[in-house]
């Protein structure tokens, strides 16, 4: 399977499995279409792009003192090559990797290898991400590339997301974080007729143990769609990456590090998705957390403060057009000379002094204090009228 | 925000142990002194290096004092709605600085608690809510089912109601102990759905408005149910938001209070002391279930003690009690598989649980047990039968709600099919008139 070999492999670390399914062989417009169009399944462009974006992020940006990146397992449909990105935090071999397609057999085999690696140490972090089609009927079935190959066993090439996660409880990894970036909606009349028995990727066994932290993150609510823009990452993937990058981080008491924890990821991703939906033409999508989890595990330690948005406007709004704005913190300084509109900038999280001066004398210079903190940053309207 | 200067003009307090000057922040959240009193927000004090120096449960209409090193701080109140209120203050040595939040704008005083939780639209206070008015959904109705001696019957609702064009709020008075109840809502364009009414000695509120995320299944109508246990409801909302970070910080007060209560009500000593009737009157089953689910979810198994077993024995009519005990057993080592199976079978027989978390735990545990090679053929058949009974509820369930909500025509008949119209059997109450 397509395991990106990183070296040297740490004793305890983060093991990531990523699956992105965009092409479906037996769905309309596939190579061998066998399924009716009434199921609402189509070919997708976003999943492999989202999967690659997430893999790239882990290879180049992920950092964890307790669980450094140890392995990345990647499956993509359509099958394609993956050039390990520049700036990877760990050496990757080989330099160009042909990625295996996300058929059911490949997913099951990759899962087995990943499961064993996760099970190798109690301090491991296991992170599983799937992007593609999903069908929910009680549990969520995630569909492999060859879904529908056997019309007599429709769900043979799909797997039960919830029960696969539940089966992980036998695994020793302390964090078991499963993410489903998939629709949870199929026409109701079709759903009612479907025999629904997707297998889990591992048989769950009652074994009297549970991991320390086992959240599930669904990209969308039940009976709802997960959106993706054509040939771009899904909305969820975009939001999730921003959260990992730092929008979901917090600086805890007694700890100088900025950390993204499982307790913040769900809420922060929902916040970013809600902000994105304010852009014209972007649908509203609401992600959901579930599972058993404490929220106390740090998934990512930032090496520097996160970048957060700052928006500065004026009242009256036209005053911003002739304003010089300056944000300063010690020797750091950010400046905008007069130009139309509000000042929108991303700065490292910190507390800044904001000064505004104007080329027109009718507006009075003013200053304010800016607490630029994730996830929202800071938005201020300066009252500058005479 | 106001600064309170000491009478001597500002001499610094000295902390005798550290020799450091200190300052005091008094943080208060004002409300309208109505139903929302005691609702919980997360208070946070952040220093200028953006480290959180203090986190605490901030109760509506009460205050909290925090001692800090003099300096500049940002105080936030993170609401269960996800909204964050913030104030910036300078804490001066030897002085007390009052930081005051609220009252929250609310379209009506009767909606303050629901606005605080984020389930009612606040826009009414500043303009009209963005969603359609309730009158756009004609022929919407509600009715209440209750299970008495194993038989489901329709029952009138007792309690007040308030309504404007966008929101209706119905109070539902508590029923006698040991009764499981469901609210059913439907309409000419609203698929019939059932929502469990948590068994609690305090009243419940049912909020009805247009949905922020209309789907085929909800027909564009949201039904949000809350008990008047404000701190428990706040905790549920944080969990529903996925904000475990906030839930973790506010839970300690609720969990500790609940543990003290359970120590009295559900310990082995209490078993010897109390008659069954008295016990069922003492325990607030809904509140206890919320506490147990939180401890199970956060794997705080050592804090469960023997109470889930007693809870399941004493509140035997409540499916959640059996699920909670089975879940504890399944997380223990060694597992008593037979006991877990019996509890799950009990829960399935009484299904569905009142809380969605209970349905999730029940559904998954039955799947796990079904595959377990340690069970006899007969036991596996029993698990299979229990799973067959629970599966239709799981399929028809709205997993986004904290309280079990499913599509169906009757509490025993969950269904994926959408059923529209007005029932012929009452009593029913019309939320909007049929046209």
Image (cartoon, rainbow, N blue to C red):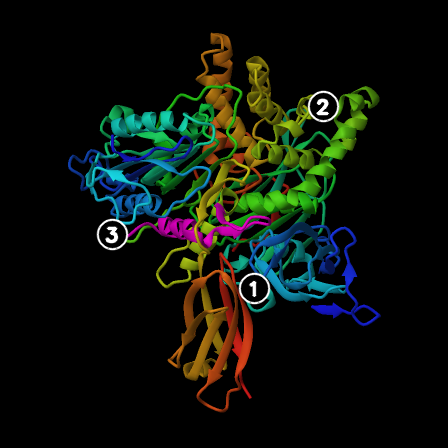
> Residue A27 in magenta?
no
Chain letter for mark 1, please: B
Picture quadrant of residue B71: bottom right
In the picture provided, is A227 more to the left or to the right than B135? Answer: left
Chain letter for mark 3, please: A
Q: Residue furthest left?
A: A31
> Residue A242 in magenta?
yes
Residue toward you, A119 or B338: A119
Image quadrant holding the N terminus of chain A, namely top left
Task: Label 2: state its secondary structure.
Answer: helix
Q: Position of residue B402 (x, y in %)?
A: 56, 41
- In the image, is residue B118 above or below residue B93? above
In the picture provided, is B364 more to the left or to the right than A71? Answer: right
Asked whether the viewer can see residue B142, the reply is no
- In the image, is residue B322 above or below residue A246? above
- The residue pinned by badge 1 equals B123
In the picture provided, is A317 more to the left or to the right than B29? Answer: left
Cα distance between the residues tagged 2 and 3: 58 Å
For the residues beneath circles 3 and 1, the answer to whether they share a chain is no
For the residues beneath circles 2 and 1, the answer to whether they share a chain is yes
- Label 3 Cα neighbours within 10 Å, binned few <14 / some 14-19 / many ≥20: few
Task: Label 1: state its secondary structure.
Answer: helix
- Label 2 Cα neighbours within 10 Å, binned few <14 / some 14-19 / many ≥20: some
Total numbered labels: 3
- The residue pinned by badge 3 equals A231
Task: Label 3: state its secondary structure.
Answer: loop
Numbered label attached to residue B314: 2
Cα distance between the residues tagged 2 and 1: 45 Å
Numbered label attached to residue B395: none
Q: Which residues are magenta?
A: A232-260
- Label 1 Cα neighbours within 10 Å, binned few <14 / some 14-19 / many ≥20: some
């Amino acid at each position: 399977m397509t395991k990106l070999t990183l070296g040297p492999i740490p004793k305890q670390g983060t093991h990531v499995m990523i699956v992105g399914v965009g092409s479906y062989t037996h769905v309309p417009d596939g190579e061998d279409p066998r399924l009716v169009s009434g199921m609402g399944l189509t070919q997708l462009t976003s999943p492999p792009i989202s999967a690659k974006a997430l893999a790239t992020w882990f290879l180049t940006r992920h950092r964890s003192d307790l669980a450094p990146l140890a392995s990345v397992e990647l499956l993509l449909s359509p099958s394609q090559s993956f050039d390990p990105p520049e700036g990877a935090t760990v050496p990757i071999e080989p330099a160009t990797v042909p990625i295996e397609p996300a058929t059911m057999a490949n997913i099951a085999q990759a899962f087995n290898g990943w499961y064993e690696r996760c099970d190798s140490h109690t301090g491991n972090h296991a992170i599983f991400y799937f992007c593609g089609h999903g069908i929910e009927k009680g549990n969520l079935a995630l569909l492999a590339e060859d879904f529908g190959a056997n019309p007599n066993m429709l769900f043979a090439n799909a797997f039960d997301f919830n029960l696969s996660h539940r089966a992980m409880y036998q695994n020793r990894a302390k964090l078991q974080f499963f993410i489903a970036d998939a629709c949870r909606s199929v026409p109701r009349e079709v759903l009612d007729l479907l025999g629904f028995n997707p297998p889990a990727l591992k048989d769950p066994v009652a074994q009297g143990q549970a991991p320390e932290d086992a959240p599930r993150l669904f990209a969308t609510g039940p009976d709802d769609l997960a959106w993706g823009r054509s040939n771009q990452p899904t909305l969820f993937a975009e939001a999730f990456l921003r959260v990992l990058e730092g929008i979901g981080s917090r600086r805890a008491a007694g700890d100088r590090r900025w950390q993204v924890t499982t307790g913040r990821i769900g809420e922060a991703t929902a916040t970013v998705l809600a902000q994105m939906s304010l852009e014209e033409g972007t649908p509203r999508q609401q992600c959901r957390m579930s599972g058993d989890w404490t929220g106390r595990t740090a998934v990512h330690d930032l090496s520097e403060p996160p970048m957060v948005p700052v928006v500065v406007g004026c009242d009256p709004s036209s005053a911003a057009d002739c304003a010089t704005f300056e944000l300063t913190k010690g020797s750091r300084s950010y400046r905008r000379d007069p130009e139309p509109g509000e000042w929108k900038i991303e700065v490292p999280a910190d507390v800044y002094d904001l000064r505004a001066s104007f080329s027109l004398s009718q507006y009075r210079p003013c200053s304010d204090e800016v607490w630029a903190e994730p996830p929202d940053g800071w938005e201020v309207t300066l009252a500058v009228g005479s | 925000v106001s600064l309170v200067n000491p009478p001597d003009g500002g001499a610094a307090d000295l902390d005798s142990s550290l020799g450091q000057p200190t300052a005091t922040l008094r943080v208060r959240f004002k409300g309208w002194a109505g139903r929302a009193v005691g609702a919980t927000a997360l208070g946070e004090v952040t220093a200028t290096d953006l480290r959180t120096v203090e986190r605490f449960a901030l109760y509506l209409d009460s205050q909290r004092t925090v001692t800090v090193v003099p300096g500049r701080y940002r105080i936030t109140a993170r609401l269960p709605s996800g909204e964050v209120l913030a104030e910036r203050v300078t804490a001066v040595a030897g002085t007390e600085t009052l930081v005051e939040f609220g009252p929250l704008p609310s379209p009506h005083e009767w909606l303050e608690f629901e606005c605080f939780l984020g389930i009612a639209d606040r826009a009414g206070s500043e303009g009209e809510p963005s969603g359609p008015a309730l009158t756009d959904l004609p022929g919407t109705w509600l009715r209440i089912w209750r299970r008495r001696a194993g038989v489901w019957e329709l029952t009138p609702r007792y309690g007040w109601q308030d309504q404007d064009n966008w929101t209706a709020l119905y109070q539902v008075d508590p029923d006698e102990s040991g009764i499981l109840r469901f609210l059913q809502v439907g309409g000419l364009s609203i698929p019939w759905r059932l929502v469990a009414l948590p068994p609690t000695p305090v009243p419940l509120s049912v909020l009805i408005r247009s949905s922020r995320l209309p789907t085929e299944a909800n027909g564009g109508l949201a039904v949000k149910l809350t008990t008047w246990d404000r701190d428990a409801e706040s905790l549920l909302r944080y969990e529903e938001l996925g904000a475990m970070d906030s839930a973790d910080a506010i839970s300690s007060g609720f969990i500790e209070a609940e543990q003290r209560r359970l120590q009295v009500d559900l310990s082995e000593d209490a078993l010897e002391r109390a008659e069954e009737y008295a016990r069922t009157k003492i325990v607030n089953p809904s509140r206890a279930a919320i506490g147990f689910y939180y401890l199970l979810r956060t794997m705080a198994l050592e804090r469960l003690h023997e109470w889930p077993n007693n809870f399941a024995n004493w509140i035997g009519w409540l499916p959640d009690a059996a699920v909670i005990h089975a879940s504890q057993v399944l997380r223990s080592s060694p597992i008593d598989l037979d006991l877990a199976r019996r509890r799950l079978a009990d829960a399935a027989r009484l299904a569905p649980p009142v809380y969605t978390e209970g349905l999730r735990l029940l559904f998954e545990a039955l799947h796990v047990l079904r595959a377990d090679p340690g069970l006899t053929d007969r036991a596996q058949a029993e698990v299979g039968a229990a799973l067959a009974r629970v599966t239709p509820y799981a399929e028809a369930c709205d997993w986004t709600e904290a309280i079990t909500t499913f599509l169906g025509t009757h509490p025993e008949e969950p269904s994926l099919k959408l059923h529209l119209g007005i029932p012929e059997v009452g009593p029913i109450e019309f939320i909007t008139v049929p046209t």
